[in-house]
Amino acid sequence: MLESILFKQIQMVLPEHTVVGDLLVENGKITKIAPQLPEHAELVIKDSGLTLMPGVIDPHVHFRDPGAPQKETLESGSIAAVAGGVTSFLDMPNTNPATVTCDLLAQKYQKASETSLANFGFFIGATTDNLDELCKAELAAGIKVFMGSSTGNLLVDKKEQLEGIFSQVSKLIAVHAEDEAMVLANKERFAGSTDVHDHNRVRTPEAAIKATQLAVQLANTYKKRLHICHLTTQEEAEWLATHKTQWVSTEVSPQHLLLQAPEIYDRWGTFAQINPPIRDKRHREALAKALLNGVIDCVATDHAPHTVEDKQQPFPKAHSGMPGVETSLPLLLNQMNQGFCTLEQVVRWMCEAPARVYGIQNKGKLAVGYDADLVLVDLNAARMVESKKMKTKVGWSVFEGQTLKGWPVMTFVNGQLVFREGDVFGDIKGKALTFSTASI
């Protein structure tokens, strides 16, 4: 176990600005940041070509544990995470069994403490009859509400049911915002279709904006924190630009930000089938604008791995979802290198904002007193995305073959080295995240 690390004369992305200097880690905490510090540490890292930033917090993953170990587990998902510079994650409840009770939630925390390399938090899922469990789920990062189709009994789509949740719970409510009735009606219209391009015609922008507007209305009525997951439409982005309140935050995934229809379906077919769908150029451009101007608060991957066999099925039988936890930081660093944004914005979207939105304590910044969740990146490293080198169990990516500039070199979780240039060190385990009252 490393007791102390000194990063010496290295570029650091601090909350206020990016500087060259020294940073000292002792017993898992950042204890000193200064222009010059004495070279007294167990490990001293000097490399003027690298940049030190906070570890990424991915607030939306599906690590499929329990229930689908062939797709992912908490262990394999966390390995993929740290390989991508992600030091903390929030995992969703649509597992098997679904995480809908406090006992099942506690079981996930226990398993993660034994197997996860990254720090962890878990959502509890809302059903039509588990309000008592939602109200006492103190461990939960938040309450996940699927307003549109999901697995098992994780569907709450009636306004009166939603009002019961919004009026009673104290935790942040994160929603998958698609109007179920509209989606079902569209499924009837396109019944029999095997054209994956019809996925966008089933899960329409109209279904998304209708559900988002209802969720915001409820959040404002009951003054409850609302987080809208994976925003996908121009309509939502533009409506939120004028209607977003202090109660509301949202996220965008790299795939919705960077990919567009019909090209992605032409190339990848059902491998590009996800919920909500990847949409056309006008939506992608609107999401980029909303991220830059602050309407969208943070980037989250919605890492939802399925096996190649699951994805090779024809539309609509193919499973919806794609992996992304280990490519998100390289994708955003590549965008920075292409001039879309600054390095400081990448850190804000992927580190600071997730911690702020969910009230995650002592994470997301390079600051004295904060946990030493750190990632060293080489902003100039150009490397191709290769499925065969990925750590996720499913071993594929729709970004396969793309050369990205900017990659993690070393990842530290609570001051311990867990990843270095392709190698993962699994003897170190992450810790449960702690949450305050979330605010934005």
Image (cartoon, rainbow, N blue to C red):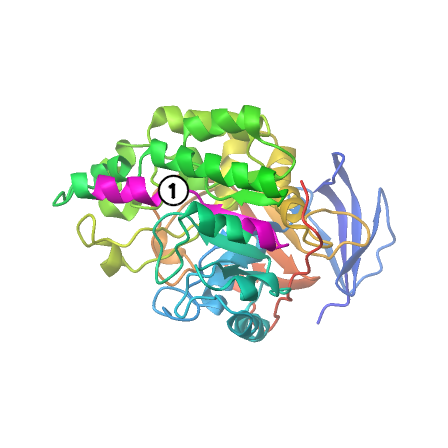
Whether residue 228 appears in this view of the structure is yes
Which range of residues does the magenta coloring cover?
A: 166-187
Q: Is residue 72 left or right of residue 242?
A: left
Tell me if residue 99 comes above or below residue 110 in the rendering.
above
Tell me if residue 435 comes above or below residue 273 in the rendering.
below
Tell me if residue 179 comes above or below residue 31 in the rendering.
above
| Residue 184 is inside the magenta segment | yes
Residue 322, given in percent of the width and then of the height, sits at 36, 51
Residue at the spot 45% in from the left edge and 63% down from the top edge? 129
Residue, disc 1: 178
| Residue 261 is inside the magenta segment | no
Residue 101 or residue 364, whichever sits in front: 101
Residue 437 or residue 378, whichever sits in front: 437
Total labels drawn: 1
Instruction: Bin the neighbour count of mark 1 within 10 Å (Cα to Cα): few under 14, some 14-19, many 20 and up.
Output: many
Quadrant for residue 233, please give it.
top left
What quarter of the picture does the C terminus occupy?
Answer: top right
Residue at the spot 50% in from the left edge and 43% down from the top edge? 330
Q: Amino acid at mark 1?
A: Glu
Residue 62, given in percent of the width and then of the height, sits at 44, 58
Residue 52 or residue 170, whichever sits in front: 170
Q: Is residue 97 left or right of residue 118?
A: left
What quarter of the picture does the N terminus occupy?
Answer: bottom right
